[in-house]
Image: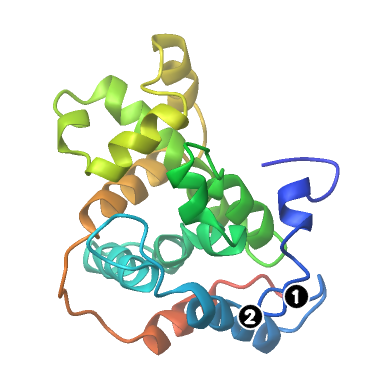
Amino acid sequence: MSGGGAPANLRSVINQPEVAVTMHADSSSVLATIERLYTAHGTLVYGEQVNQIQHAMQCASLAQASGSTDAMVAAAMLHDIGHMLHGDAATALDTGEDDRHESLGADWLARWFGDDVVQPVALHVQAKRYLCARDPGYLEGLSRVSTRTLHLQGGPMQPAEAEAFERLPHARNAIDLRRWDDLGKKADCETAPLSHFMTVIERCLLPA
């Protein structure tokens, strides 16, 4: 998470028509904005077998099937929203750039959601790096795209980094989210509709 106001990459997207919403927007406006993002960018594919909305709903379904809280289901649904906020994540991948989607998404979501949603989103890339360092065999199970982006994101954690990560309050939830992220990439996987998960997301909005 960044401090001192929105980072430059966030400021570059918040005025896009499908993203623009004020800090003090009511819940219906925030939810409508999220739906617009999925409508505008949810069909984008970044080298996996699924598009963005399919991946999000598969991850949220896995969270729900595990008996997780509404906040974790919402985090699973929203964890890659930074890719859609970025606007050209596919080009970033093609040119070997890290779009920092986890930070972009978390900064945007923090205006309306608490840490139980925001922090797993912010940490899910670091959780990948952690698991590569701590879980034998995890790296070999990553998809081709996740393996490629791992190197852009810093590679497996060093021991000191991993120890520091383990001490973070939301590390365990971020690891759970990361595992759903890895599993939620199956072609032709049926899930509940978007409206089902939007209801869960609505329950997680901070009080106005």
Residue 197 percent location from the top left of the image: 40, 79
Query: In front here: 185 or 180?
Result: 185
Quarter of the rendering containing residue 15 = bottom right
Quarter of the rendering containing residue 31 = bottom right
The disc labelled 1 sits on which kind of residue?
Ala
Is the N terminus in the top left, top right, bottom left or bottom right quadrant? top right
Q: Residue at x 81, y 70 (%)?
A: 23
Q: Is residue 7 visible?
A: no
28 w.r.t. 69: above or below: below
Residue 69 percent location from the top left of the image: 39, 64
The disc labelled 2 sits on which kind of residue?
Thr
Query: In front here: 33 or 116?
Result: 33
Residue 124 percent location from the top left of the image: 43, 44
Earlier in the chain: of badge 2 and badge 1, it is 1
Residue 208 percent location from the top left of the image: 76, 77
* C-alpha span from label 2 to label 1: 7 Å
Q: Are marks 2 and 1 in contact (CB under 8 Å)?
A: yes
Q: Residue at x 52, y 39 (%)?
A: 98
Q: Is residue 28 visible?
A: yes
Quick one: SS at disc 2? helix
From the image, tell me which residue sits under label 1: 20
**Residue 120, disc:** none
Q: Is residue 74 left or right of residue 5?
A: left
From the image, tell me which residue sits under label 2: 33
Density class for disc 1 (Cα within 10 Å; few <14, some 14-19, many ≥20) is few
